[in-house]
Image: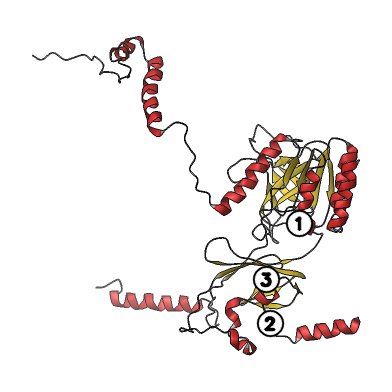
């Protein structure tokens, strides 16, 4: 004896329920309004229209900080326009910097190394600092 | 005079919309519609000689045009909402078609996002300050919006102080909000403006004229004596010099230079330089 409903009748019942629910939903009976892609953008700000200088100004050294700011901000405006690409001339070349840093790591590291480790540093001193040797650990004796 | 006005208004009312290109630098009135360069071909039987030949008439390469203050978008055209001269600026880079705006004059300021303004602190309620910027409502300024401000390290701002800041929120639906730091968290000259000095109000057009990159007035003023000026886009200027008399002279010059011709200005500066 079948107590439950058939799968088919179940499906039919579900479909009927869905139909009733979707018919109850409200919808606007208007034609589809397509919003055209507009090529006009609205802006209310004058900053885009006219290149205005920075609002704080100081003359003849009255306020040195503001004078520094003036140079900075007005130069920023000009830099954006001209897209300056001048590479700054280096006082120290990159290779020299790398060499200095190599030795620097060793000297500063020595400061924080413990007394036992300092011995490792001094061994390889030919003008170049070499890194710490492996620490002496307990070696398990082989039978 | 009234008859001429009537005739002019009738002729404008019955007119076709004009091309924006042809009206540059001329006075436009509210209600006029302006055509952008791409649309001139279809509307304009009289300008047959200028119509360029197009092989592919259906496809038009559209440029992005920005309509600035005083203009509104109306379908594909620009609608003028303020009276003044129409200006145009070509873009420096990129594919946009440039920006059109109306150079108008007014005294009442409407807050705009990104503008640097001078405000007066009117109230201190909880965590925010209420700052009067000359608009329809006071702007709110949070106490954390200063450089180096934390919950424990509060900025030293009292009621009645002058603040130089910029708007982060400014539209017709919400209360304007301003801050005294930029997006990186640095002050860049914003914050409380120092002691002494004089604050006075001028028209908005004068501020823009004085802040133009090649403004002669500012260059001449700078040669007189040591001084400091702060310009707010809301029509407020704060000046400070070493003595009260110098400060007052400066304020009078800046207020009066709007209506003076270049010659009159040079005369006054010459007289000041002598004394």
Q: Earlier in the sequence, mark 3 or mark 1?
A: 3
Q: Earlier in the sequence, mark 2 or mark 3?
A: 2
Is disc 3 on the same chain as disc 2?
yes
Q: How many marks?
A: 3
Determine whether the residue tagged by mark 2 lies in a helix, strand or loop: loop
Q: Which of the pair B28/A141 is nearer the observer?
A: B28
Residue at mark 3: chain: B
Q: Position of residue A133 (x, y in %)?
A: 26, 18
Give the residue pinned by disc 2: B17
Give the residue pinned by disc 1: B209
Q: Is residue B132 visible?
A: no
Residue at mark 2: chain: B
Question: In screen coordinates, is B79 left or right of B238?
Answer: left
Is disc 1 on the same chain as disc 2?
yes
Question: In screen coordinates, is B35 left or right of B201?
Answer: left
Give the residue pinned by disc 3: B72
């Amino acid at each position: 004896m079948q107590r439950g409903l058939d799968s088919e009748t179940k499906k039919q019942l579900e479909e009927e329920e869905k139909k009733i629910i979707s018919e109850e939903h409200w919808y606007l009976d208007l034609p589809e309004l397509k919003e055209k892609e507009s090529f006009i953008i609205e802006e209310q700000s004058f900053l885009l229209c006219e290149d205005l200088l920075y609002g704080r100004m100081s003359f003849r050294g009255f306020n040195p900080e503001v004078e520094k700011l003036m140079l900075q901000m007005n130069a920023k405006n000009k830099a954006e326009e001209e897209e300056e690409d001048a590479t700054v001339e280096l006082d120290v070349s990159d290779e020299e910097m790398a060499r200095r840093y190599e030795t620097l790591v060793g000297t500063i590291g020595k400061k924080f190394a413990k007394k036992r480790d300092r011995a490792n540093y001094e061994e390889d001193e030919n003008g170049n600092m070499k890194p710490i040797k492996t620490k002496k650990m307990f070696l398990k004796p082989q039978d | 005079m009234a008859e001429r006005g009537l005739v002019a208004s009738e002729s404008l009312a019955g007119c076709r919309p004009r091309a924006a290109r042809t009206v540059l630098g001329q006075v436009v009135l509210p209600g006029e519609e302006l055509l952008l360069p791409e649309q001139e071909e279809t509307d304009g039987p009289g300008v047959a000689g200028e119509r360029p030949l197009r092989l592919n008439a259906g496809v038009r390469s559209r440029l992005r045009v920005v309509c600035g203050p005083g203009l509104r978008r109306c379908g594909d055209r620009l609608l003028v909402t303020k009276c003044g001269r129409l200006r145009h600026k070509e873009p420096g880079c990129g594919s946009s078609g440039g920006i059109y705006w109306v150079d108008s004059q007014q005294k009442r300021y409407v807050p705009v996002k990104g503008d640097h303004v001078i405000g007066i602190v009117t109230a201190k309620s909880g965590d925010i300050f209420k700052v009067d910027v000359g608009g329809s409502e006071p702007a709110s300024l949070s106490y954390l919006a200063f450089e180096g401000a934390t919950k424990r390290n509060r900025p030293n701002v009292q009621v009645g102080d002058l603040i130089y800041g910029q708007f982060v929120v400014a539209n017709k639906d919400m209360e304007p909000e301003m801050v005294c730091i930029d997006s990186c968290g640095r002050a860049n000259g914003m914050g409380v403006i120092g002691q002494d000095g004089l604050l006075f109000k001028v028209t908005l057009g004068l501020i823009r004229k004085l802040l133009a990159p090649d403004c002669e007035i500012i260059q001449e003023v700078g040669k007189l004596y040591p001084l400091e000026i702060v310009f707010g886009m809301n029509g407020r200027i704060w000046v400070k010099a070493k003595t009260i008399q110098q400060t007052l002279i400066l304020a009078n010059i800046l207020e009066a230079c709007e209506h003076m011709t270049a010659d009159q200005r040079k005369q006054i500066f010459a007289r000041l330089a002598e004394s």
